[in-house]
């Protein structure tokens, strides 16, 4: 006994052609989705380099993981190169992740209102984290002073 299976594409039995009823509408978003797709690929490659460089310097060079402390971070962020490196890693990781979650929201949120509010929360969280992270990188003070007294930590020279 043979059973003919109907093709999901055309509705005909044994046909491999795509049904002609599907028409691609005019793109209202322009090239944004193409640029978002391209950004994911390019930022992913750059992030791999940034992250492995970060891990190598933090875990393999010097004392390894045992050398990571306040003084290590303070020493790294005293150099503009490492500030830029960490800033690039922060911004690319956040934008890469935000774009990925935006794609998931577009794919799985069925209602327009739900999709809108999920994206508002996503974009707001992204902006807050990027701004706070950028401020931390550029305003980090390795020798904090409270009420005219240098806080203990042993990193900064005595006044």
Image (spheres, rainbow, N blue to C red):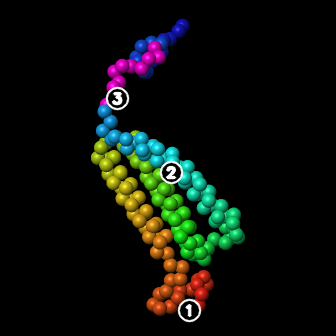
Q: Residues within 10 Å of mark 2 (few under 14, many from 20)?
A: some
- Residue placed under numbered mark 2 in the picture: 43
Q: Find residue 1 and report its horizontal and vertical position in percent.
A: 54, 7
Q: Is residue 124 above or below residue 30?
A: below
Answer with mark 2 or mark 1, whichever residue precedes in sequence: 2
Q: Give the labeled residue for mark 1.
A: 159
Query: Could you tell which of marks 2 and 3 lies nearer the N-terminus?
Result: 3
Q: Residue at x 57, y 86 (%)?
A: 152
CA gap, disc 1 to disc 3? Answer: 71 Å
Residue shown at 62% from the left, 59% from the top = 53
The answer to whether the residue labelled 2 contacts the one labelled 1, judged by CB atoms less than 8 Å apart, is no
Disc on the earlier residue, 1 or 3: 3
> Pointer 3: what residue?
24
The residue lying furthest to the top in this view is: 1
Residue 10, compared with residue 107, is above or below; it is above
Could you tell me residue 75's position as x and y percent?
59, 75
Tell me, yes or no, whether the highlighted magenta stretch contains residue 139: no
Question: Which contiguous range is marked in magenta?
Answer: 15-25
- From the viewer's perspective, tell me whether residue 5 is left or right of residue 106: right
């Amino acid at each position: 006994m043979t059973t003919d299976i109907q093709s999901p594409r055309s509705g005909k039995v044994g046909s491999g052609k795509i049904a002609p009823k599907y028409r691609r509408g005019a793109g209202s978003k322009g090239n944004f989705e193409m640029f978002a797709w391209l950004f994911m690929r390019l930022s992913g490659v750059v992030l791999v380099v940034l992250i492995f460089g970060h891990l190598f310097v933090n875990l393999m060079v010097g004392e390894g993981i045992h050398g990571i402390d306040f003084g290590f971070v303070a020493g790294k962020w005293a150099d503009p190169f490492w500030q830029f490196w960490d800033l690039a890693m922060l911004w690319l990781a956040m934008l890469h992740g935000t774009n990925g979650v935006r794609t998931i929201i577009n794919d799985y949120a069925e209602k327009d209102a739900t999709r809108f509010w999920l994206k508002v929360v996503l974009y707001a969280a992204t902006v807050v984290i990027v701004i706070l992270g950028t401020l931390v990188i550029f305003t980090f003070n390795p020798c904090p002073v409270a009420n005219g007294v240098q806080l203990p930590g042993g990193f900064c020279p005595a006044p």
